[in-house]
Image (tube, grey):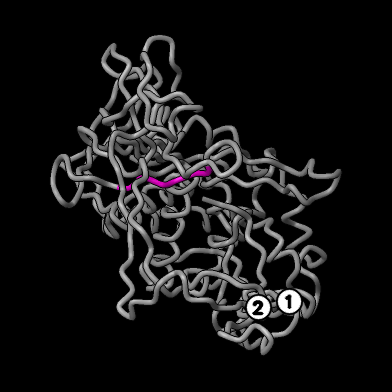
Amino acid sequence: MLNDAVGRGAAFRRRRRLQPAGGPGDKIFPPTYLGEGTNAPPRHVFERRRINGNDVPCVLIDSVQSQANRLEEALLAAARAGAIELPRVAVDFNDCGLDSVGEISSLDAPHRIFDAILRDSLLDGTPFRQSDTGIRLRQATMQNASAILEISPTALLFGVWNSTGEGGGLGAKFARAIVSEIIGIGAAVEYAADTSARRGEMIDSRGVTADHLRTASRRTGSRIDPLGIVKSVEVFKSDTDWDIDGKALGAKAKKVEPSKINHGNIPPTVQALGATCDYAEQTAVITLAGLRRVRFGGPPKRDQAARTLLAALGLVALTECDRQGYALRSRCDLVCDGEAPLQLVAFDGTTTDIALDVEAARELYRQSLDQARSAGFKLEAEPTRLVPQDKLVTIVRKSQEKALRDEAETDGAG
């Protein structure tokens, strides 16, 4: 079945309706992003989508990038538990005294198999990019992606770009073959101009864009100090410590309010955050037409085996992620609202429902592994293990030391 679908089908698709774990209408908290302008408050991402012929206000609950990370995490957990065999590359920081970092694999690293963490590590004493394995990866193209399939097939499934490769970032690019996103449909919103949003003023909805949408929900915050420390008490703070005597801390000590050293009350605040919506929906697509664009340097049977392996891996990712659940972040815990069959989409748009649970997906993947190995692919059950270079260990250790001294720089991410 899977071989035929990969050879002829357009995509696997699933649209799953979700509800808050607290029940329909319960408030959830989508991800926040920095607002535009200086000191702009954090905000959610709202937009209007065309649904059943109507423009419906929607809120982004989990982005394509975030969903990809969750799917990779689910696959990695299954591999580490021994449920599936999964070729990958891993860098072990434990022997360097960096137990807090642990092991980082090509499924954890932001740029996957071409990430700087792997680039700056050693394979059998050789810098990874200069090793035989690294050279094979750098030579991979859309015409022959065999090296990536054998070393880290998830990079082809989730997309990868050799952005630090030859030609100033002109290395090979492989588009995502799996895309998943969760949005809240029918979100409760209000219209506010950028200049008036902070004053809470309402404006006419005519002619406004999605940039003017904001949530109609509110998040409150406050803290009562059990010690009863008041803001008028003088304290002094240096880079590393605080005291009631500024002279004891040196010339760089500054007088601050107790809240700057995490003491004292925090007055109540109200922010336009959180969201309620009619329901949430996850849309997941594995593009079979996209997989057919990737070749593997051999006869059609070899290409077919590789593409089938990637499709099976995508199905495992979806079912393993289902098994883990949809606890996306604090106060954003979703549950399934009814059944949602996987669909095979044909080239003409017709669909066929497919019953698939996690065990069936794993079995399809095992069969596709055997088929790929029979076609000549060398797919190792154990990860390729790297050792971080000394210079990489040094900058990680220095960063941790600076963080402990409250000197770490932040990137301002929301």
Q: Residue furthest front?
A: 232
Q: Is residue 165 above or below residue 246?
A: above
Q: Amino acid at mark 2?
A: Ser
First along the sequence among labels 2 and 1: 2
**Residue 252: mark in rendering:** 1
Q: Is residue 162 left or right of residue 268?
A: right
The answer to whether one can see residue 123 in this image is: no
Quadrant housing residue 173: top right
Given residues 254 and 332, the one toward you in this image is 254
Q: Is residue 346 left or right of residue 25?
A: right
User: Does residue 162 belong to the magenta stretch?
Assistant: no
Classify mark 2: residues with Cα within 10 Å, few (<14), some (14-19) or many (20+).
Answer: some
Q: Residue furthest right?
A: 167
Q: Amino acid at mark 1?
A: Lys
User: Does residue 32 belong to the magenta stretch?
Assistant: yes
**Residue 304: mark in rendering:** none
Classify mark 1: residues with Cα within 10 Å, few (<14), some (14-19) or many (20+).
Answer: few
**Residue 238: mark in rendering:** 2
Q: Main secondary structure of the magenta part?
A: loop
Classify the position of the N terminus by image quarter.
Answer: top left
Relative image position of residue 53 (x, y in whole percent): 28, 11
Q: Does the residue at mark 2 contact the one at mark 1 (Cβ under 8 Å)? A: yes
Which stretch did the figure color magenta?
29-34
Dot 2 falls on a residue whose secondary structure is loop
